[in-house]
Amino acid sequence: MTRKNQLAGDAHWWRNAVVYQIYPRSFADANGDGIGDLAGIISRVDYLANLGIDAVWMSPFYPSALADGGYDVDDYMDIDPRIGTLDQFDELVQRLHEKSIRVFVDVVPNHSSDRHEWFKQALAAAPGSPERERYIFRDGRGENGELPPSDLASHFGPEGWTRVPDGQWYMHLFTKEQPDFNWDNPQVEEYFLKTLRFWSDRGVDGFRIDVAHALKKNLSPLPDRDSYALSVMKDDGTDPLFDRDEVHEVYRGWRKVFNEYDPPRVAVAEAWVHPHRRPPYASEEGLGQAFNFDLLASGWDAAQFKSVISDNLAMSVETGSSSTWVLSNHDVIRHATRFAIPGYGLSPDSFDLENQWYVQHRMDHDLDLAAGLARAKAATLLMFALPGSSYIYQGEELGLHDVVDIPSDQMQDPQWFRGEGKFKSRDGCRVPLPWESSGSSFGFGPGGSHLPQPEWYANVAVAVQEGDSKSTLSLYRQALKLRRELYQSDELEWLDLGPGVLGFRRSADWICVTNFSHEPVEIASKVLISSTEIVDGLLQPNSTAWLSSL
Ligand code: GLC
Ligand code: CA
């Protein structure tokens, strides 16, 4: 059966969409319990429409004990009562669709939470039972099975196996509250097809697929692993835990479900794989689009930006998909702060450097935050000029910095608690948004805020920026409006503008120039928009401008 939704028509809307990520617990709180909710999002639909985005992606809103910020799902076909109801969800979809804003929801197929009905049944059942076969249970090693079945760490810390009272162990690539599903069990496969239909029937337009490169595993022999660095992952489809070729059979099945709808539902893969392994995730037979996180790992450097952009545009030609671009999300230090971290992006593993900086310096940092913000605005304006779709994260339109100095005892992120002092906390980008410059939670809601908000929020609140044509919010709004007018095709032609200056032409009357150097650059033509003011025809360092010609 083919079902229509209100925004039927263009099946290719996603190709150059600007998608705004909402972290529901931290966007807007309508009932004052300190936790963002669907009613809060509904109350801000006009804000989203005025921003000029094409779609929103909501991070998990499912019932959850929040062992991993909601990526531990108790029930894939319901809403956490603290966040809202299915009726409110339907209302939100309707309200967004009325404004021509599409909706992505987050699907977490690698693991459920340990409060999921199936996991409870598995614990209640005996070793070897069909109930346990939906997850990955094994006997331990050692005389009495007291040692874990293999030497497997998890992403967030030491152990990747947890023992249950009858002596068996279950596997979890993330926290112990996130047991991995057994994707060789057809029931698991069917359950997710049902989940995709459940949300598609409610009018959802697309899905963001969490750790899409996991799911299928080769468990004989049981794998050992002590690091999740990309360099450790095999790049030929034979890694026992990630990016196995069989995972694409799963997504071919999902694609059939997407195509039952009009327009077809779409998906974007979160797949942390070697770049040359990304294409099948983005293929038309698969999920259709895959995140490219290369800008998250780039420093403020013209050469790095240029190679990331050219490589990914070449890859999108290969896959027939469009490229995606990401500067911030709920898992990384916000880009306004990241671009101020000395040396960031110049090391082969920028994420290690980010973690080290965070662990050592977060409480007494002397970052040049003004330079970081200027670079962030310039990078965003550059990103909005690129062919393909941009994924932006709530609060970046306010130029928010990461709240790096949250006291340890108020943090929530398991990566911080389980990481033995090696990993950053992701709470700093998840602090509830400032809507007003005063009030108990800066207008986030009538009550408090589930993470502490910093005093400097008063200066960057939405209410302050709305009235200021030079604010970061105004820049985002103006840029997205212009982008709609200027975007004609996916063509991009590089211009040679000298060292440290990156320029490209998108059409006869749309040129983007970014100054990564330390010297101002002369601009002799009409400026359409710029991330910092052009004075005396000069584009300042850490700035981007769109020009109508050269
Ligand atoms: C993804 C999410 C992250 C989560 C992890 C486990 O990487 O983006 O927030 O912790 O998956 O589900
Ligand atoms: Ca609430």
Image: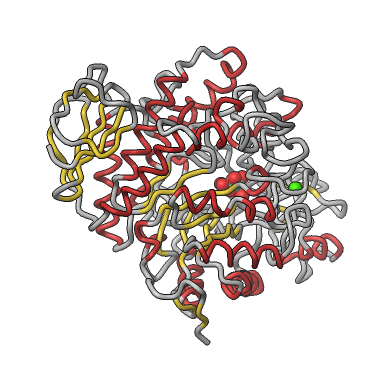
The colour scheme of the drawn protein is secondary structure
Residue 492 on image: x %, y %: 20, 49
Residue 171 visible in the displayed image = no
Outermost residue to the front: 467
The residue located at (51%, 75%) in the rendering is: 5
Quadrant that contains the C terminus: top left
Outermost residue to the bottom: 1
Question: Measured along the vertical axis of the image, is residue 481 above or below residue 14?
Answer: above
Question: Measured along the vertical axis of the image, is residue 127 above or below residue 427?
Answer: below
- Is 446 left or right of 248, judged from the image as shown? right
Residue 116 on image: x %, y %: 76, 60
The residue located at (59%, 19%) in the rendering is: 362
- Is 266 left or right of 517, judged from the image as shown? right
Task: Pick whichever, 139 or 255, lies toward us.
Answer: 255
Question: Measured along the vertical axis of the image, is residue 134 above or below residue 273?
Answer: below
Task: Pick whichever, 318 or 89, lies toward us.
Answer: 89
Residue 65 on image: x %, y %: 77, 49
Q: Quadrant of residue 293?
A: top left
Residue 310 visible in the displayed image = yes
Task: Pick whichever, 56 or 48, lies toward us.
Answer: 48
**Badge count:** 0
Residue 501 on image: x %, y %: 21, 28
Q: Quadrant of residue 503?
A: top left
The residue located at (51%, 71%) in the rendering is: 254
Q: Quadrant of residue 9?
A: bottom left
Task: Pick whichever, 297 or 223, lies toward us.
Answer: 297
